[in-house]
Image (spheres, rainbow, N blue to C red):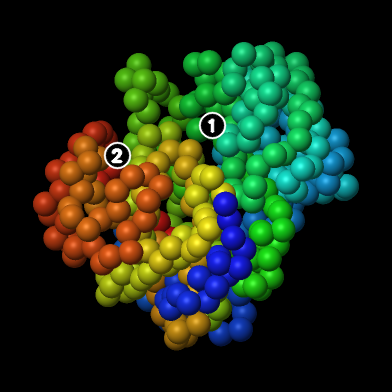
Amino acid sequence: MLNRRRLLQGLGALGLSALGRSAIPDHPMAPRQANAVPGDDWCGPNAGSPLLVPGDDGLFGRLAPGGAPLRMTATGSTGTDARWPTAFVANHRGLRWWNPTFAFERGERVRIELVNAIGEPTIVHWHGLATDTANDGAGLSLAAPSGRYAYDFTVRERAGLYWYHPHPHGLTAGQAYRGLFGLVAVDDADERALRAALDLAWGRTEIPLVLQDRRTGAGYAASAADRHHGFFGDTATVNGGADPFLDVATRAYRFRILNASNARTYRLGFADATGKRVPCTLLGTDGGLLAQGIRCSECFVSPAERIDVLVDLSAAAVGDAIQLETRAFDPMHFEPPGSASGSTSASANPAPNASAEAAQVPVHGADDGWPEGAPRRLL
């Protein structure tokens, strides 16, 4: 059981390090620095675009219904926030969301009507939330094309990051790949205490990162093998954009990460421009906030998993560049000694040199995209 005092004391005892494309004093969303040191791979010089940072509406924007009934439509995605061909669109109190991040309070009643406008059966599964069969969205009940489905349940989970996605039999992967998914952030007293202690604000210092690899220029034209095993894309995206960057201030940031890829596992970690690994603190996993933060150098994140990490930039200098990267590993589970093992575990020990690992790690499951075990920069 989470002990709030123990968690907050543990965070205070950890000497955390820096994260960010460039560190800028006292301004969490300042313009990109011209002298920022470029990364490699998808983070090359003069390439990419600013990371989409969700706010209070728009794509992945935070939507707190507070028990009020909502209508959410699965439909074609249009507008300035359109990064996938389809999306869940919701309107509430004069604002519009695409794939909203639902902010539910523990104990809150949720009433959402799903409208299906995508031309094939669909249903929403609330991944990680304990509901009855009628509200689970596991595929036993479907909203037919032009049909509707009503959800009415109470949130029982503790604070943590969950998500929602389609779950119609045989259509789940394709609908999610085309953009039908979003986050669920459950709040409670422990979550509010954590935010207050760390002075966190959604969309400024608390930022969701949705990872998904995609095939360039292709829709979900899946082969029989793809439908059985999933496939690897040749481009990694973060919040729907490839090669993103984020300018940050010299303070602590919380990143709430979802792996929305259909097959790829990421070995996530942070590193500076020289390749030196930068530690972070693991605050939570699929099951919610941990009893105590864990200082770590990397975490494995499998498809559909979530992790919650904190990185402190207070020691960073203006112009420092640090990348979020996925590191080399053997998908057949022959990781070198000292690396993290298990999809939700994190290693507090320094791992072997990344370039040396890449040279010795055998490659499995490679297709026309980049191998799962190859190191790549993501942000």
* Image-quadrant location for residue 17: bottom left
Q: Amino acid at mark 2?
A: Gly
Residue drawn at x 77%, y 19% as measured from the top left: 148
Q: Amino acid at mark 1?
A: Ala
* Image-quadrant location for residue 165: top right
Q: Circle 2 sits in a helix, a strand or a loop, which is it?
A: loop
Q: Residue 159, how many percent across, how many down?
A: 64, 51
Circle number at residue 307:
none
Question: Does residue 91 appear in the picture of this structure?
Answer: no
Q: Which residue is mark 1?
A: 176
Between residue 156 and residue 218, name the one nearer to us.
156
Q: Callout 2: few (<14), some (14-19), or many (20+) C-alpha neighbours within 10 Å? A: some
Q: Circle 1 sits in a helix, a strand or a loop, which is it?
A: helix
Between residue 305 and residue 82, name the one nearer to us.
305
Above or below, comparing residue 64 to residue 379 in the picture: above
Q: Residue 337, how many percent across, how many down?
A: 18, 55
The residue mark sitting in front, 1 or 2, is 1
Q: Residue 99, how many percent across, how many down?
A: 66, 41
Q: Which residue is mark 2?
A: 369
Compared across the picture, whether 76 is left or right of 225 comes to right
Question: Does residue 150 appear in the picture of this structure?
Answer: yes
Above or below, comparing residue 351 to residue 104 in the picture: below
